[in-house]
Amino acid sequence: MPLIGICGGTASGKSTLAKQIKSYFSKIGVVCIVSDSYYKDHSLLNFKERSKINFDHPDSIDFELLVKNLKKLKNNQKIKEPIYSYKTHKRLKKTKIVLPKKIIIIEGLHVYCNDDLIKLFDYKFFLDLDSKTRLKRRTKRDTKERNRSIEEIKKRYFDMVEPMYENFIEPSKKHSDLIIDANNINFKKIIEKIDEIL
């Protein structure tokens, strides 16, 4: 079962690409994992305290659980995936049963920031997109889907999101097998690369 990584900055199109790949290979079966589901559990903190957490730093991810679950999927075992709420900034008590499929995709900001995780990948894509476009896309998404104010979005972006991108996410693209211009995605080439490892 090949494990495919999709990484890139915030709002670079990771989820959209993962869904397109899943749709294309629907007949053989694809499971998509989002690394955001593996944010560390901060449910003991109140909302104000949780709102101050830097979720764009790699330390925010529970890599130990993520790696453990991905190994299970690759070994054809089902997993219990955490469910994270963006609105409340915390992991929910309930979990989601995920069954193994022919192709496993994991997408997220930090997926190339952990050595144990990098070793599991069979192929790694990186979506490259400029900061201005990412901020524009994030603002549109977070006001609509996550009930954030424009002021809050911009403050978090410039205080946390972009500095963490420059320090960790952008440098991590050196681990990728293919860097993709997110403004001009060649989907045919992506499918060809996946076909090669199947």
Image: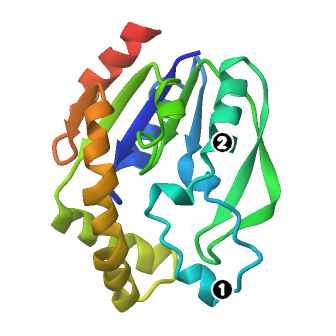
Residue 122, position as x, y percentages in the image:
45, 19
Residue, disc 1: 47
Report whether 89 appears left or right of 166: right
* Residue 193 as seen in the image, left or right of residue 51: left
Disc 2 marks a residue whose amino acid type is Glu
**In which image quadrant can residue 46 be found?**
bottom right
Q: Amino acid at mark 1?
A: Phe
Which residue is found at the position 52% from the left and 57% from the top? 59
Where is residue 139? Give x, y as percent.
33, 76
Residue drawn at x 34%, y 59% as measured from the top left: 11
Identity of the residue drawn at 44% across and 48% down: 110
Secondary structure at numbered mark 2 = helix
Residue sitting nearer the eye, 32 or 110: 110
- Against 141, residue 110 (above or below) is above
Residue at the right extreme of this rendering:
94
Residue corresponding to mark 2:
64
Q: Position of residue 153 (x, y in %)?
A: 37, 81
For mark 1, does the 10 Å Cα neighbourhood hold few (<14), some (14 to 19), or many (20 or more) residues? some
Q: Quadrant of the N terminus?
A: top right
Which of the two discs, 1 and 2, sits closer to the camera?
A: 2
- At x 65% / y 78%, what residue is drawn? 88
In which quarter of the view is residue 74 placed?
top right
Q: Is residue 5 left or right of residue 163?
A: right
Residue 9 lies, in percent from the top left, at: 32, 54
Q: Secondary structure at mark 1?
A: helix
Asked if residue 143 is positioned above or below residue 2 in the image, the reply reads: below
* Count of numbered circles in the view: 2
Q: Earlier in the sequence, mark 1 or mark 2?
A: 1
- Residue 145 drawn above or below residue 134: below
Q: Would you say 16 lies left or right of 192 here?
A: right
Establish if 155 lies above or below 90: below
